[in-house]
Image: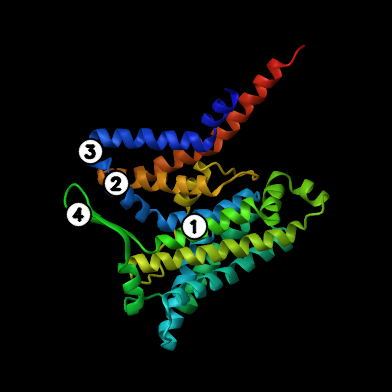
């Protein structure tokens, strides 16, 4: 019984129940919302947020915070497209993703060196690199939209895993780009739950000093975390390019709040030591559902930010409140 209560009171379960209640309320107002077509549409709209969230989850699990991931993603995306089109290279679609991931990982090295090697605060570093990467992109790479998308990329974007018609006759689809999210999720899940590297990430997030005492090279692990997170951000940027079929250097930056909210709602803690792939993906789906539902209901965009901000506060404070409640109950249960 206690295990069942603990499961229900876990952050992921609370988020899931919140999503169900929110969906039921929206469904009562709009019966067409509760349909397979709506779920497919939500999955499509949450692809980029979900990929970003997986990289941010790793950083939060290690006790850090990264706000530069959108700048890394758009830099990798725009630089890749500019490079391939500028050199007129016959590049398969997978090549775009590989190059973008490598550029993103290269940018992540800077974060990793400053944080892991020099020991600088993660928030300060990533705030600085957010501005640095964005300024470097607009200064040295380009500021114009690129709309002459290669035909193979257009073909990839038009390839759908599922395509159905919703209640009002509109076609909704889940694009082939979903395999990028699924692939990243599988790799990150295996890395975090099976490998020694994943256990080191959680150990550092739980207690950095304790991790050092048991022989973990904290600086080296942090460097790898930010390199991997940069590569994931590059994949997210390229996924955005295939969905929009246009390389816009002004895209993505500004969506950091939604991604961080998704990860926090999924059970990750700013203090580190917690976080999961399933929680991050569930959080991304909930954030997308809330934003989409409020938008379709005609709620102004600034109210969406209010809701997301409240969810961040709830997602951050709820685990702490639950933990304090459990500790208080344990103390009261002890014999005097």
Q: CA distance from mark 4 to mark 2?
A: 13 Å
Residue placed most toward the observer, 179 or 101: 179
Q: Position of residue 176 (x, y in %)?
A: 37, 64
Name the secondary structure under disc 4.
loop
Q: CA distance from mark 3 to mark 2?
A: 14 Å
N-term-proximal mark, 3 vs 2: 3
Whether tag 1 and tag 3 are in contact, CB under 8 A, the answer is: no
N-term-proximal mark, 1 vs 2: 2
Q: Position of residue 213 (x, y in %)?
A: 83, 49
Tell me if residue 85 comes above or below residue 61 in the rendering.
Answer: below
The answer to whether residue 4 is left or right of residue 289 is right
N-term-proximal mark, 3 vs 4: 3
Name the secondary structure under disc 2.
helix
Q: Nearer the viewer, mark 3 or mark 2?
A: 2
Tag 4 residue:
170
Residue situated furthest left in the rendering: 169
């Amino acid at each position: 019984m206690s295990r069942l209560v603990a499961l229900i009171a876990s952050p992921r379960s609370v988020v899931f129940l919140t999503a169900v209640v929110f969906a039921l309320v929206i469904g009562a107002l709009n019966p067409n919302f509760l349909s397979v077509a709506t779920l497919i549409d939500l999955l499509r709209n949450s692809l980029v947020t979900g990929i970003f969230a997986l990289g941010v989850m790793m950083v939060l699990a290690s006790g850090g915070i990264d706000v530069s991931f959108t700048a890394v993603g758009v830099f990798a995306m725009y630089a890749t497209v500019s490079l391939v089109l500028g050199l007129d290279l016959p590049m398969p679609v997978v090549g775009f993703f590989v190059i973008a991931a490598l550029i993103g990982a290269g940018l992540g090295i800077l974060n990793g060196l400053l944080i892991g090697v020099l020991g600088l605060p993660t928030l300060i570093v990533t705030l600085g690199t957010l501005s640095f990467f964005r300024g470097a992109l607009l200064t040295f790479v380009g500021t114009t939209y690129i709309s002459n998308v290669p035909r193979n990329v257009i073909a990839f974007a038009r390839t759908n895993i599922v395509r159905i018609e919703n209640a009002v006759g509109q076609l909704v689809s889940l694009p082939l780009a979903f395999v990028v999210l699924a692939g990243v999720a599988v790799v990150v899940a295996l890395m975090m739950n099976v490998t020694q590297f994943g256990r080191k990430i959680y150990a550092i997030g739980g207690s950095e000093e304790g991790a050092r005492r048991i022989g973990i090279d904290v600086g080296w692990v942090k460097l790898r975390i930010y390199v991997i997170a940069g590569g994931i951000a590059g994949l997210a940027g390229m996924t955005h390019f295939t969905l929009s079929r246009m390389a816009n250097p002004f895209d993505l930056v500004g969506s950091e709040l939604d991604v961080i909210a998704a990860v926090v709602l999924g059970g990750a803690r700013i203090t580190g030591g917690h976080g999961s792939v399933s929680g991050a993906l569930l959080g991304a789906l909930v954030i997308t559902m809330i934003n989409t539902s409020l938008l379709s209901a005609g709620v102004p965009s600034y109210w969406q930010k209010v809701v997301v901000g409240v969810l961040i506060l709830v997602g951050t404070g709820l685990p702490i409140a639950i933990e304090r409640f459990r500790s208080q109950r344990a103390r009261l249960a002890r014999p005097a």
